[in-house]
Amino acid sequence: MSLYEDWKNLLDNQTDDSFKDFWKEYSDGEVAIYTYILAHHRTHLKGKVSELAEKFSCRPVIFEGFLDGITSSLKKDIDVESIDEDSEIDLSVDFEKLYYNMHKADAAHLYELPQWEKVLDEEKRASIVKEYNKSKVYHAPKKPGRNDPCPCGSGKKYKNCCGKNL
């Protein structure tokens, strides 16, 4: 079984009893990795998966979960499904996209890390949050007026067709 399959299996097979411990293990590893990445934002995170997992005191399957989560914030795609413990990785992070995606994932434990202050200035972070908040605004579809053509396609006015009984 691949490391990615192990990750998906671990993620999908949590029970009420194991979920709390799993989540603590994953989030502790994730915070350690992101803290390092942000503190060293001018360099790429690179190395062998097994060595990086050891560096951040997490199991390789947990590191694979981190990789699965960060892929949409990278400048260059990686194939997380083909990665194994001996794979060499070189992550080039798009920090603006990463900050946005952390808000999208509702990961306050990550987007509130103090290391962000040296990566993106306060104005840029506020701009990204504003952009994210705009993306959540719901735009209700326009309702037809009484004298508009009926949306059912009958050719009648709405008031004489589908809106007749309203």
Image (cartoon, rainbow, N blue to C red):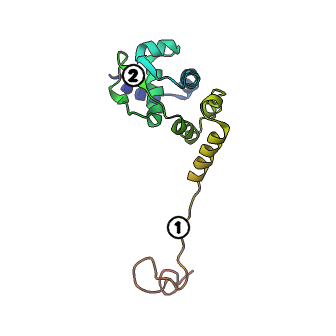
Label 2 belongs to which residue?
89
Is residue 151 shown above or below 79? below
Give the percent coordinates (x, y) of residue 85. 37, 16
Q: Which mark is residue 158?
A: none
Q: Residue at x 59, y 56 (%)?
A: 137
Residue 148 drawn at (x, y percent) = 50, 83
Residue 125: x and y in percent read 63, 40
Of the 4 image quadrants, the one containing the N terminus is top left
Residue 3 spot, x, y in % from top left: 37, 22
Which secondary structure lies at badge 1? loop
Depth check: give the residue in front, 138 or 71.
71
* Front residue of 23 and 133: 133
Q: Is residue 3 left or right of residue 104?
A: left
As rendered, which of 56 and 60 lies closer to the eye? 56
Query: Which amino acid type is shown beneath numbered disc 2?
Result: Ile
90, above or below 99, in the image: above
Q: Nearer the viewer, mark 1 or mark 2?
A: 2
Quadrant in the picture for the C terminus: bottom right
Count of numbered tags: 2
- Residue occupying the point 42% across, 16% down: 47
Three-letter amino acid code at disc 1? Answer: Pro
Q: Residues within 10 Å of mark 1 (few under 14, many from 20)?
A: few
Q: CA distance from mark 1 to mark 2?
A: 45 Å
Task: Name which quarter of the figure residue 112 lies in.
Answer: top right
Report the residue at 39% width, 22% height from top. Answer: 89
Judged from the image, the secondary structure of the residue bearing numbered disc 2 is strand
Q: Is residue 31 above or below residue 159?
A: above
Residue to which mark 1 is pinned = 141
Near-viewer residue (27 or 122): 122
